[in-house]
Amino acid sequence: MIPRNRPVINEADIAQQAGTPIATWRRRDAPAFRQRVASLFPRSRVLIYDLAQARAYLAGQPLPALPAGEHPDDLLNDEETAAVLGVTASTVRSYASQGYLSPGKTLYSVRVWPRRDIEERLKNPPGQGKGGGRPPGTGKGPLKAHAYEGDPRLDTAAAALSTAGDIPRHHIAASLAQQHGGSTRTWERLLTQASQTTLPD
């Protein structure tokens, strides 16, 4: 959980702020860092940390405490959202794509939702009478132009393509995966989509 929608950072950006290559950081510095600074999503393969805590660690200062308790602005990932709603993580992702739940937002390749949206969905579950499910007359909702429509990573992929020159797409994808998390294969698909999509200025 990201408490109160606080700013976050991943290890690639932490290494950059420390002036250390990410490979060196993960081999030499990450074990000690992880002992002191807890990942906000400990079960996720993408490690995300509180920005203020990471900066305090790098500066050799005491780590500020994270806010305690639940708050409407907390950001939960799919597993945490699923636990609140009593469904599976895949169902949460399906709800978001079908309009039963807000689309959330993506931070370092992790999709998150505000607790207020989740609690609203809990009060009005899909198909439970008035207030539940899709609004009347919406049918299945608008179809996406493509699978990554609305995904903020598409902008990142497009920006990378615009400056890549003759660099092979696989190498661009691998670099993006290292910087932002996610798999190289996913970034290859995003790069392909970005090359086929005219993005707004």
Image (cartoon, rainbow, N blue to C red):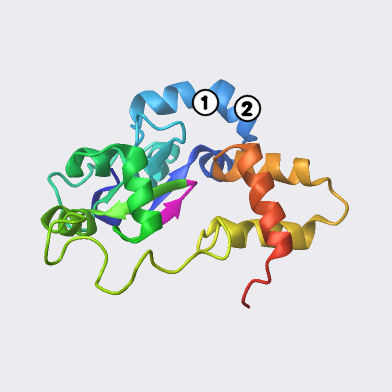
Q: Which residue is pictured at 55% across the width and 57% down the height?
A: 148
Q: Residue at x 84, y 48 (%)?
A: 167
- For label 1, the residue is 29
| Quarter of the figure with the N terminus | top left
Does residue 189 belong to the magenta stretch? no
Instruction: Give the class, few, some or many, for how many residues have Cα within 10 Å of label 1's Cα (few <14, many ≥20).
Output: some
Residue type at the position of mark 2: Thr
Query: Mark 2 falls on what kind of element?
Result: helix
Q: Where is residue 70 in the image (x, y as percent from the top left)?
A: 14, 48
Q: In which quarter of the image is residue 62?
A: top left
To which residue does mark 2 refer?
A: 24
Residue 51 in view, yes or no = yes
Which quarter of the picture shows residue 100? Answer: bottom left
Specify the farthest residue to the right: 166
Check if mark 2's residue and mark 1's residue have beta carbons within 8 Å.
Answer: yes
Q: What element carries label 1?
A: helix
- Can residue 77 be seen? no
The stretch of residues the image draws in magenta is 104-109
